[in-house]
Image (cartoon, rainbow, N blue to C red):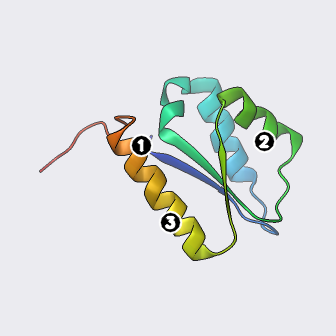
């Protein structure tokens, strides 16, 4: 499992595998929730299952319009998770 998990929902693209992965996180790796972030492209509507899992995990959703917006959100989330949430397992120098 990754040290930091980023779940991205693009509009007009099937996101079944993202849903499966986030359900796996909620059902079997709840200890990793603090190391996960969720991003939804503006205009995309999540289905009931997806909203339910995100609400159960008590996570916020970052919204983005462009790839650059997504990159900025992801960079900020990764830094936060690695520094503030202590999500990295091992650092090899």
Q: How many neighbours does mark 1 have within 10 angstroms: few (below 14), some (14-19), or many (20 or more)?
A: many
Residue in the image at 32% along x and 42% along y: 83
The local secondary structure at tag 3 comes to: helix
Residue 32 image offset from top left, x and y in percent: 49, 31
Q: Is residue 3 visible?
A: no
Question: In the image, residue 21 lies at what x, y percent?
Answer: 63, 43
38 lies left or right of 81: right
Crowdedness near tag 2: few (<14), some (14–19) or many (≥20) residues, C-alpha within 10 Å: some
Q: Answer with left or right where residue 1 lies relative to residue 56.
A: left
Assign a secondary structure to mark 2.
Answer: helix
Residue, disc 1: 81
Decide: is 65 above or below 18: below
Quadrant location of the N terminus?
A: top left
Q: Which residue is mark 2?
A: 50
Label annotation for residue 72:
3
Q: Nearer the viewer, residue 51 or 76?
A: 76
Q: Residues within 10 Å of mark 3 (few under 14, many from 20)?
A: few
Q: Residue furthest left?
A: 93
Q: Are marks 1 and 3 in contact (CB under 8 Å)?
A: no
């Amino acid at each position: 499992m990754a040290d930091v998990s980023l779940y991205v929902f693009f509009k007009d693209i099937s996101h079944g595998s993202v849903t499966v992965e986030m359900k796996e996180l909620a059902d079997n790796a709840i200890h990793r929730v603090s190391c996960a972030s969720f991003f939804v492209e503006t205009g995309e509507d999540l289905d009931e299952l997806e909203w339910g899992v995100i609400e159960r995990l008590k996570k916020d959703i970052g919204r983005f319009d462009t790839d650059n917006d997504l990159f900025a959100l992801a960079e900020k989330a990764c830094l936060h998770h690695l520094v503030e949430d202590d999500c990295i397992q091992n650092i090899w120098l």
